[in-house]
Image: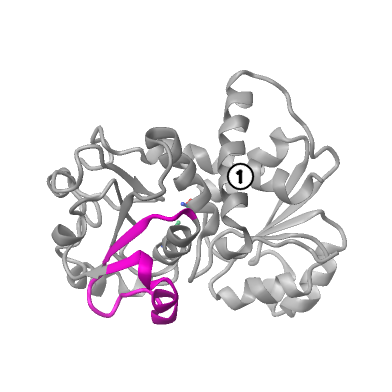
Amino acid sequence: MTTRHFLTLQDVTPDEFKQIIKRASELKAIRNAGEVYEPLTNKVMAMIFEKASTRTRVSFEAGMAQLGGHAMFLSSRDTQLGRGEPIEDAAKVISSMVDVVMIRTYEHQTVETFAAHSKVPVINALTDDYHPCQLLADMQCFFEHRGDIKGKTVTWIGDGNNMCQSYINAATLLDFHLNIACPEGFEPNQTLVDENKERISVYRTPEEAVKGSNLVVTDVWASMGQEDEQEKRLKLFAGFQVSPALMDLAEPDAIFMHCLPAHRGEEVSDDMLDDPRSVVFDEAENRLHAQKALLEFLLVK
Ligand code: CP
Ligand code: NVA
């Protein structure tokens, strides 16, 4: 049997995606009721990080512990990966000792190469191109606050990179429309846009893009690895800030999400995260529940 990986949302079917979201809400209820549920006793997860993290590390590590398993934090700085050990060799060795691997890298190709040489499931915990785990949490959050997202309109504002590209995948899987407003030169991958073009409308201004929207989403203007471009991007992304005034142009029931960490005063106004329409902290908490559902989906037969 081939090993099941989760490198992008395209690794699950629409039904599986919805099943994971539903299960995430059930696991949330189990945890909130204080019940012990440990289907992953004796299972070990390796967590490989080339980049920084708060939410992803804490949610996976806590999630594995709550499911009865164990998680091992491996920074590429402190392992032989940081000293040039080939990713293929590392994948063979690490996957011979653990039951699942979570990996956060710069290049998406690194995750693909790791998975190609891994004996156990590999989970993409963010690459420069995709952040599928975040979409599990975001979609769980939308379902919990507003019900099924099918037929709704979502607006993405900002950089067309990893988060935006995972929203494109989610739009096709869950059957919603995605309006995208990016500054010129920061659009998502054109092939991905072309492949999903019935689901996507591209706008030049956030004001046009949020009209008719039920969910507005943004992210930092300079992602991890782009710190040198911070100053330049502040200028190029001016006008793309999400604020309560911009939210007023969306549907009256619109909610706001941001994967966090956020830069107040840049992609979000100082008051946006605390606006009643913001669900960012529920969204962040759902990383825990959604990833536990994903781990159960991949590891419990
Ligand atoms: N949203 C998210 O992935 O956060 P971290 O970078 O803190 O893991
Ligand atoms: N686009 C951001 C997401 C952080 C969770 C980054 O890649 O840094």
Looking at the image, which residue is at 56% across and 42% down? 21
Asked whether, in this view, residue 12 is left or right of residue 251, the answer is right
Q: Position of residue 33 (x, y in %)?
A: 61, 18
Q: Quadrant of residue 281?
A: top left
Looking at the image, which residue is at 53% across and 67% down? 127
**Screen quadrant of the N terminus:** bottom right
Q: Depth check: 17 or 246 in front?
A: 17
Q: Position of residue 156 (x, y in %)?
A: 31, 59
Q: Depth check: 97 or 18 in front?
A: 18
Q: Is residue 182 magenta?
A: yes
Q: Amino acid at mark 1?
A: Ile
Q: Position of residue 69 (x, y in %)?
A: 78, 40
Please rate how many residues cluster around mark 1, counting C-alpha atoms within 10 Å: few if below 14, some from 14 to 19, many from 20: many
Looking at the image, which residue is at 23% across and 78% down? 184
Magenta highlight range: 174-201
Q: State how the image is colored.
A: one colour
The residue to which callout 1 is attached is 20
Q: Quadrant of residue 266?
A: bottom left
Answer whether residue 25 is visible to the viewer in this image: yes
Asked whether, in this view, residue 139 is left or right of residue 40, the answer is left
